[in-house]
Amino acid sequence: MSHSVRSWPTAAALILRQDMATLFLPVSPMSDALPTGQQLDTPDTIESSGLQLTERDIVFVCPNCQGELAVDKDGAGLSLACSHCGQTVTVPEYSGPSLHFLQAATSKLADALENARSSGPRDFQLEGRNQTELGTRQHELERQIRETQAQVSDLREQINHARIQLHRYQLKLEMLKERENELKAEMDAVRGQLSLSVNQTRKKE
């Protein structure tokens, strides 16, 4: 059964366009430094803020009109009508965050980190708060610190996994190069033997 591409309920789950010019939603530009008293957002919030694409999106090209489509990964394998040309297309399998999302998210995180490091000391403005308010804030900060530490630990594990995976890919690449060299050497040997055989046949004639 075929579904209309535009029938996806969540706006962030589907973006249709001919190019990547609309990758960013209109948002207020970031200031050069964080306003005094403003708490840093989480990395997940920073990288997704103002982006039409999400980490879940499958970005692919319509084989009929070459228009770019983006569909939430839950739509993998479905047959949908391309909004550019109306032809039926099959959504490919999800293979991880798209390059478009990774480039945009990385740029946003780099800018946010630079802004955070260049901002002045934060004024916490605690004067005038009573013990109840301060105690409540203390408990909230303790909770946020635990969450942040857990996220740091999780990201370190992911980075370690990614390093091992990268090393694996590098070894596979080197093995493929060795295989290519071996195949080319055999090809040269076959061509040489074939040429020798042809010459011998001609001499006999």
Image (spheres, grey):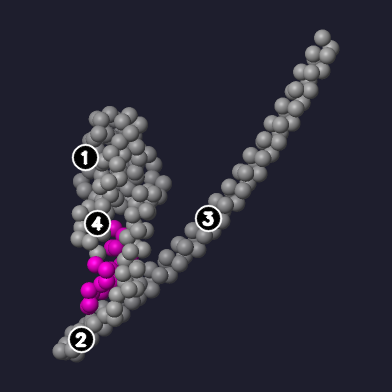
Residue at the spot of label 4: 50
Amino acid under label 2?
Leu
Within the magenta stretch, is there residue 39? Answer: yes
For marks 4 and 2 on the same chain, the one whose residue lies earlier in the sequence: 4
For marks 2 and 3 on the same chain, the one whose residue lies earlier in the sequence: 2
Residue at the spot of label 2: 126
Give the label on residue 6, or none.
Answer: 1
Amino acid under label 1?
Arg
Residue 109, percent from left and from top: 34, 63
**Mark 4 to mark 1: distance in Å?**
21 Å
Closest to the observer: 190 or 35? Answer: 35
Residue 59 visible in rendering:
yes
Residue 13 visible in rendering:
no
Residue 135, above or below 87: below
- Asked whether the residues under the numbered discs 2 and 3 touch, taking CB atoms below 8 Å apart as contact, a structural biologist would say no
- Asked whether the residues under the numbered discs 3 and 4 touch, taking CB atoms below 8 Å apart as contact, a structural biologist would say no
Q: Which residues are magenta?
A: 31-48
Residue 141, percent from left and from top: 28, 79
Give the label on residue 129, or none.
Answer: none
Front label number (1 vs 3): 3
**Mark 1 to mark 3: distance in Å?**
37 Å
Name the residue furthest top: 205
